[in-house]
Amino acid sequence: MKSLGNLALRFFFSGATRGTRCLLAVSTLLLLLSATGAFAQVPASAIAQNPSAYQPDASAQPNNQTPTEATPPSPASLREAAAENEKARLAVNPVTGMTTSPGVGYEPLTGQERWKLYWKQNYFSVGAYFGPVFTALVLDQATGSPQQWGGGFPGYGRRVASRTVDAILQGTFQAPVAALLHEDVRYISSPQPGGKRRILHAIAYSFLTYNSEGHPTPNFANLGGYYASTAVSTIWLPSQHSVAKYIFSNSSEAIALTLPVNLLQEFWPEVVHTIFRRPEQR
């Protein structure tokens, strides 16, 4: 765990300027969006880890009533409960574009859930587009990369389109490989309390995930997806002096940027609590 953490920190600090700019900008945008209530929701990880906290207390009854015999739930109510549970399990963070699975009481994804999550994380959620729009602005537009695309709105539009397609390709490469290797495509939250342990966990899980048995395993599908999508993106990007160097450097930079993203995902319940004064549930 410590060696993975040290490796991750070297990745992060090697691109400190761009990574720090991205993290600061995320924090600023969070404050702006909090004024509109855009993130006023209970985190999916909180519901998954303590579902009873969000259910009415069935044991509480008025003093003037006697207990009645419990009736079995109807098929309709069971279907509704199952749908709500699946919705919580597959909820996509509107900032990071990721879904969280609790490390405690881990439940692997079913094949149908993998399919649904692929569409949600890559196409049908706010988070699917927040990242590309944001990174294109902070990392590409601010540095004028690539230079051949120029500046202003036309240049920014090209960069957003490139980042969006690149993100979709990464998810498209990741999904089938993860299913084949029985790797989870969600972020696995820390099973242990304590800020330091959770920070180290978030760093390590930029490179790890759970397998279908709930054991840590290298996240080959996710890491390989970054290199594969970057390689494909060279088709439409302006010519590079060294394609191999570009693929390695940009893919490694993208992996390094998963560190602040994972930290935000790990501490998302606290972010929601701080902004909206909601009770923390882990």
Image (cartoon, grey):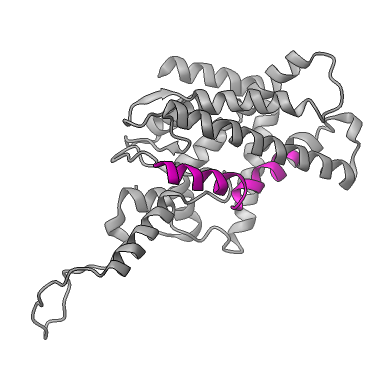
Write the residue at 67% across / 43% down: 25
In percent of width and height, residue 21 lies at: 69, 35
Q: Which quadrant, please, contains the N terminus?
A: top left
Q: Give the number of marks.
A: 0
In percent of width and height, residue 275 lies at: 51, 56
Tell me the magenta residue range. Answer: 110-136
Residue 132 relative to residue 92: left or right: right
Q: Check the image and report above or below for 260 versus 223.
A: below
The part of the image, by quadrant, that contains residue 253 is: top right
Residue 131 relative to residue 96: left or right: right
Q: Check the image and report above or below for 5 versus 183.
A: above
The part of the image, by quadrant, that contains residue 171 is: top right
* Residue 23 covered by magenta stretch: no
Q: Which secondary structure class fits the magenta region best?
A: helix
* Residue 129 covered by magenta stretch: yes
The one of 134 and 169 positioned closer to us in this rendering: 169
Write the residue at 48% across / 36% down: 185
